[in-house]
Image (tube, grey):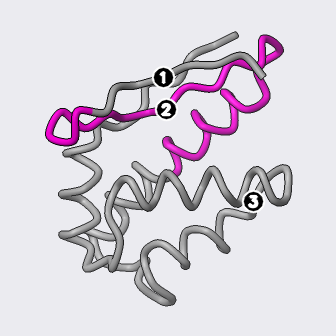
Amino acid sequence: MEDIELPGHAELDEAMQAAGAECGAAESHGTICGMICATGSATKRGWLEHLLGEGNTLSAASRIAADMLATLYAGTLLKFNDGARVFSTVWRSAASGMTAASRKT
């Protein structure tokens, strides 16, 4: 399986903030995972507008965030469709003491 380098949590969080999005990196990843689980895939327009805000895709900051979100979506979808069916969280929080986890489904 080809691996896609996902954007870092801090970098995506900063890009989302610069774009004026109401959510950050963790909520973005959770939304993408939820949409993929609920539908098997998701149209880019649907989740992108949901995460960045309707009509908020024209500014330079929004385009940067959109590119990072597209990479996050592609990498997440690839992980869900991996034949080994191993799911792992993308990020962990040192502050909360939570660690990344993997499990075979």
Q: Which x, y percent locates residue 99?
A: 34, 26
Position of residue 9 relative to residue 65, above or below, is above
Tell which circle, 3 or 1, labels the residue nearer the N-terminal end: 3
Q: Residue furthest bottom?
A: 55
Q: Which mark is residue 62?
A: none
The mark closer to the camera, 3 or 1, is: 1
- Residue 57 is a magenta residue: no
* Dot 2 amino acid type: Thr
Distance between mark 3 and mark 2 Cα atoms? 19 Å
Disc 2 to disc 1: CB gap under 8 Å: yes
Q: Position of residue 54 (x, y in %)?
A: 51, 88
The label nearer to you, 2 versus 1, is 1
The residue beneath circle 1 is: 101
Q: Which residues are magenta?
A: 70-97
Q: Is residue 103 above or below residue 16?
A: above
As drawn, the label of residue 42 is 3
- Kindly identify the residue that appears in the image at 83 percent across and 15 percent down: 83
Q: How many marks?
A: 3
Which amino acid lies under the numbered mark 3 shown in the image of this protein?
Ala
Disc 2: which residue: 89
Q: Give the alpha-carbon distance from disc 2 to disc 1, as whole Å.
A: 6 Å
Image-quadrant location for residue 43 = bottom right
Residue at 50% from the left image edge and 43% from the top image edge: 72
